[in-house]
Amino acid sequence: MDALISRLTDLLGADAVLTAPADVAGYVEDWRGRYRGLACCVVLPASTQQVSDVVQACARAGVPMVPQGGNTSLCEGSVPRADGEPWVVISLARMRRIRSIDIANNSMEVDAGCVLAQVQQAAAEQGRLYPVSLGAEGSCQIGGNLATNAGGTGVLRYGNTRENVLGLEVVLPDGRIWNGLYGLRKNNTGFDLKHLFIGSEGTLGVITGATLKLHPLPDSHATAWMALASPTLALEMLGRFQQRSGGVLSAFEMVNDVQLNIVLAHVANRRAPVSSRHPWHVLVELSDTGGEQVLQDALQEVLAQGVEDGLVLDAAVAASGAQRAAWWEVRHSVSEGNKKAGMGINTDPAVPVSAVPAFIERATEAAHRILPGAPIIVVAHLGDGNVHFIPQASFEQWRAFQDADATAHAVKHAVNEVAHALGGTFSAEHGIGQVLTDEMALFKPGVEVDLMRGIKALIDPQALFNPGRLLPSASPRPGP
């Protein structure tokens, strides 16, 4: 291992190879402090060629590597394993260059280490929108977003990260550089290889650059906060907004009162958008270029009819950009609030949009059979069917469990079984990491797992890229 560290230092320079425990600490522990691994060093390459040099050196030494973006994973996918020989962490933090922006082509080429908010800002300065938006956008990196196919609050209108990428640059496990940075909407020349790496969680290579798809930058918004009695009524309001406003409906985010109260209690300077307490809340937004009054009229019309029909208990319409931003801060503060409030058993299912109310009801029953009376946090991207369903315990309650890990696993599995029964998935936008490989083995069709294993073996025959992540163990499994 000393020889490898010496070689990496020769390639990158001493300041780009971290070995001291204090320097390495932030790269081997996840942001919630739940998972911690071992690394012989952390390398900070500044170019694609340097990434290639690092990969070749590690491959020759037979040392596993974990590519790392902003380290905001919720599935233990971005930190090295805690057992066995230490790994090399390849951090893209120094690769933060906006390479180019093509306004006429509505595309931009960026380094994978660019922070999501940086990309959003660079696009906005050119009158364009990069629409992927999530709570960690101030720290997560484009490479990590791509490796996990991040979702967020804009999926309803713009799709996941996958739908907003035109091309990739990737360093392969043998050190070769694949330059697939095409800025094309049409390229019918065989397999679309970028989709192998999007969502691969660092198991097939290191994403070092991307050509991203841009959209017109909305300059008009109409935003409201609605209080409702149930997810069923929220679903009815979603349909009404879709019918009335069509393609300008940009967000429809639902939280329950448990989640809202946690944010208000644990995150400074957050205020409830409506004064009275209600069991369910939705943040809805319309956006477009020009014609703000048209948006406001559509918003007010649907809200007024919803109130008249008894669907909406209370509502507030953002009167300014500052008020709109404050409401979005409430929505984006859920992870911070939950981290401070207690130990949440995070699940990330998606079901058909029509099945969301049934999922929440049945998942609550399933969780309460294991943890009677536990508060249930719900944060739902209702427009795309993704429900973050989080049974919670206080830190004291969590420490009192005889086998907390087994309890958490049982709850997750029970919730995922409900999603599966409703035609859904056990992971919508967080990925698999190490946490959900067992669920992958149970819920993913065997032929799909076999195909993925075959791709992994072809591209990474030494299995040095993020081993033990994404794919379940190769033990025999029943079923087709």
Image: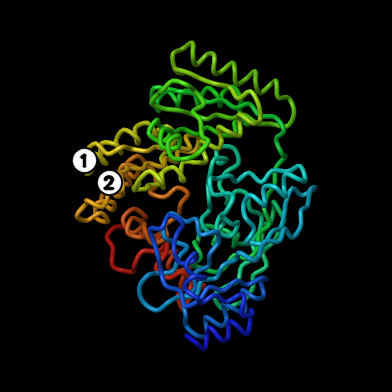
In this rendering, the answer to whether 171 lies above or below 446 is below
SS category of the residue bearing label 1: helix
Looking at the image, how many numbered discs can be counted on the residues? 2
Is 182 left or right of 242, judged from the image as shown? right
In this rendering, the answer to whether 309 lies above or below 400 is above
Residue 183: quadrant of the picture = bottom right
Q: Which residue appears at 69% of the width and 51% of the height?
A: 185
Is 57 left or right of 29, judged from the image as shown? right
Q: Which residue appears at 40% of the width and 23% of the height?
A: 278
Amino acid type of disc 1? Arg
How far from the left and from the top, in percent, is residue 285? 59, 30
In this rendering, the answer to whether 257 lies above or below 14 is above
Amino acid type of disc 2? Ala
Local packing at callout 2 (Cα closer than 10 Å; few below 14, some 14-19, many 20+) is many
SS category of the residue bearing label 2: helix
How far from the left and from the top, in percent, is residue 258? 37, 34
Looking at the image, what colour scheme do you see? Answer: rainbow
Query: Which residue is denoted by mark 2 in the rendering?
Result: 414
Q: Nearer the viewer, residue 423 or 245?
A: 245
Q: Residue furthest bottom?
A: 3
- Do residues under tags 1 and 2 come within 8 Å of each other at their CB atoms? yes
